[in-house]
Image (cartoon, rainbow, N blue to C red):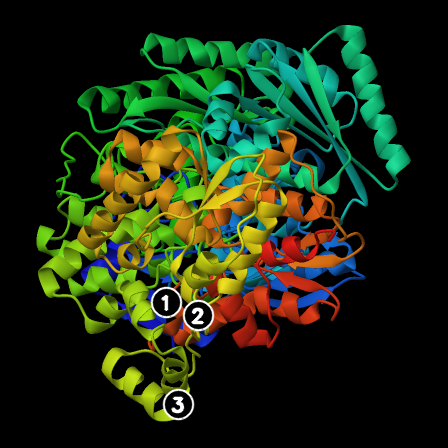
Amino acid sequence: AGDVRFDRHSRLLYSTDASMYQAEPIGVVIPRTVEDVHAVVEVAKQNSVALLSRGGGTSLTGQTVNRALVVDYSAHLNALLEVNEAELWARVQPGLVQDELNALVRPRGLLFGPDTSTSNRATLGGMMGNNSGGSHSIAYGLTVEHVIEMTALLADGTKVIFGEVTLEQFAAKCGVPGIEGQIYREVAAIRDAYEGEIRARYPKHWRRVAGYNLNELLADRPLNMARLLVGSEGTLVSILEAKVRLVRRPKRTALDVIHYRDMQEALESSQAILETGPYAVELTDKMILDLARGNIEQAQRAAFIQGDPAAILIVEYAGETEAEVRSKVEALEARRQRERFGYAAHVTHDVAEQQSIWKLRKSGLGLLLGMKGDQKPIAFVEDTCVEPRHLAEFVPRFREILAKHDTVGAYYGHCSVGCLHIRPVIDLKSRRGLDQVRAIAGEITDLVLEFNGTISSEHGDGRARSPFLERLYGPRLMEAFRRLKRAFDPENRMNPDNIVASPAITEHLRYGEAYTTWQPPTLLDFSGQGGFAAAVEMCNGVGVCRKTLEGTMCPSYMVTRDEEHSTRGRANALRAVLSGRVPATELTGKRLYETMDLCLECKGCKAECPSNVDMAKLKYEFLYHYYQANGLPLRNRLFGSIARLNRLGALAPRLFNALSARAPSRWLLEKVAGIDRRRPLPALAGETFTAWFARRPVPAHAPRGDVVLFHDTFATYNVPEIARAAVELLEAGGYRVQLVDRKCCGRPMISKGLLDEARTHAAWNVERLAPWAERGTAIVGLEPSCLLTLRDESVDLLRTDAARLVARQSFLLEEFLVRERAAGLELAWTGAGKRALLHGHCHQKAMVGTAPTVAALAWAGWEVTEVDSGCCGMAGSFGFEREHYDLSVAVGERRLAPAVKAAAADTVIVAPGMSCRQQIEHLTGRRAQHPAEVLRDSLAR
């Protein structure tokens, strides 16, 4: 059976989506089977309770939040049931994510055509609910054109299959007893009564989803009731499964990214571009590009940008051959040169680079909502659409309305079809901001009418645009909408208040002029985010943390598929406390602890969340307060003191290793400290690194000067061979390696909420490292989580110039080598032709990237394949803890372990992180090496 959650905490997690709205549900049900859905609908009927079907919760206009019983299909009802390659269709459950569907049918050369910018977490059910479009709608149209058949439950629990029917079949359906027959009879009556209004009032541009699809009743094709239901936003039926159309995937694509100094020039040139037959034409403005440069992950993707454009157009071409695609790009470039539009262009045929550019484009929404401060680009008039030929006239008029109300907008979207997602920058926490929303929404609706366009072209109506549907369609068609709603849902229990009978646009807002937060005192520095509450509010609900196929964020969600264990879920839980929706005492309560517990502190969100939500940092601060109030467990003290324990164990390493490996010891540790007996403990080396360093022969010459090696706890006591390799490598390069009397970096303490102790350690280390940093000496580290603590948490703990100076002078070994090579470092290598499979450490990927590691290994001659393995699942002590062991293994088994097991025997597995190497060996039996070892062994002797 599925999960049933009626506690306040769970309800608040589902009270928001990616919109500006908040509505606390009655309860949440997460069905495991179709039978569970039947049971939920029956219970709701018996108790006269409203129902809301929910997928990824990425809606922008509030249609996935309501005072209703929320049914979350995404966790379990997400299967691909059947594929018919010959007839190009698939049967899917509503919780299946679009990218997951495309990954499953990709080996057959197929795809589902509509592609939203949220394709890595948007479900097919949600796409049918909104009638989604996306970047390639110029080629594939809207979702409605890809739905063949729909199996659904009506509000009374009746199961109905809606699909194409002939006139004779339609007449027969009208005679069926019960609610199904009533629906068909009423649909026929609506068609007959409102045909004239439908033809007169529906926007002529095909790119429209506002209201119900009554135009489908007049189509020059057999009636398909499934097409009528697409875009109904859960207000008519609950979808159980659907038969959807697939298309052939283009064999070749290319991008031509045209740069403009003026957005108006981009809009005016889009018509000429459309005449060349593109596969997509997407606009991104300067506001988004500037925000991308400030985002760790997106800055790398934006590196191709030339100069400082006011806007770019991403023009894509598709074809069956490389020659065909090249000829299209060349034709565009010839026309661009001839007609002189755009000051630069970046052409790429490389598949990986094209994917990177598309990810940059798709990040626009999250980047905008991650703007610091209360002024945010808000979605409420962001889905307008006019004929593409009118864009160059429409957008300046739109801009004039914004200027009239003393604001500006962010611009991105689909020039190919006349749909630009223009988001006014507004402070929803102020009365002035709410007045701006009301005024701008009305005036933009009138502007759209003037151009015979639509206010909703792919994002749906929801709470933001339903109030303006009567202005768009007139009172007669609104009555037709109400009649259709009553036919399917006579008791108004299916996602009420959307499309028909909606409240005012500024009702049920997440924020508002009465919204306040309290600021708990923090040990870490949150001033850069505007305070602890503002750091939490950086999460805007777009839900990138719900992706499952790539990247690191969010490992716990990838395994559990539970909203509570996503970055968004944790942020919502924290915000509920800070905003007073639950008592302030809950900040140190058990329920919030349960939500924060499965955060692996991987920092994936710090880089991959478009808004740069740093949930690891928020968790550190939370744990500090939680343990201050509730006491510190023994296990936290043990793991936080790992450096001290290793130092004691190093006095008799053989005895320590023998005891820690014995079954009785493991049993005792599990019972007393909760350390899982299935996880091997790291052994201590016979000789510590510092002992070796003290007795080694020191080179007589060091022409490249000093380097401070920040020798971490593991390299000192557990794997000194790595630190020895680093010393030999650096000395071979002509450096004099120096050690300082450092303490543990503090990472084990930080991760366990021991921030006071971590601050003491940080102060000690900075005091000893700062003199070297002042002389310009590099501080080089081997363990990413330790070295990067100097660059991140130490600064937040100390808030001093000395800490910031040490951070600037701290480098991972591979970073340092690549930098020094650019400055003239020469080394002779023997690694040519050897193959390596690289798994990067999570903190490394979040803060530095793996490019330096790849570059250093490539310099040594290695052929490097980097596996998109995400988090390994160990997360320091997390994978040792009894209650976390199974999740830890499940995370590692998703992508990392299969990639390692599939690697050839002569491929060297490379992993900079100690935890990662432990997990790899535990799950695969293969030993992974640190880059220092691989590089040292590749030196020409």
Compared across the picture, whether 781 is left or right of 904 comes to left
Lateral position of residue 285 relative to residue 754, left or right: right
In the picture of the structure, the residue carrying the numbered disc 3 is 662
Count of marks, rendered view: 3
| Residue at image mark 1 | 878
Q: Give the mark, 3 or 1, whose residue is nearer the N terminus.
A: 3
Q: Is residue 346 above or below residue 498?
A: above
SS class, disc 1: helix
Within-10-Å neighbours for mark 3: few <14, some 14–19, many 20+: few
The residue under the point 31% across, 11% down is 406
Q: Give the spatial CA distance, label 1 vs label 2.
A: 7 Å
Residue that badge 2 annotates = 888
Q: Nearer the viewer's eye, disc 3 or disc 1? A: 3
Side (left or right) of 271 relative to 610: right
Q: Are marks 3 and 1 in contact (CB under 8 Å)?
A: no
92 or 335: nearer the viewer: 335
Amino acid type indicated by mark 2: Ser
Q: Quadrant of residue 149?
A: bottom right
**Any part of residue 652 in sight:** yes
Q: Residue 546: horizontal and vertical position, in percent?
A: 45, 53
Q: Earlier in the sequence, mark 2 or mark 3?
A: 3
Looking at the image, tell me whether mark 1 or mark 2 is earlier in sequence order. 1
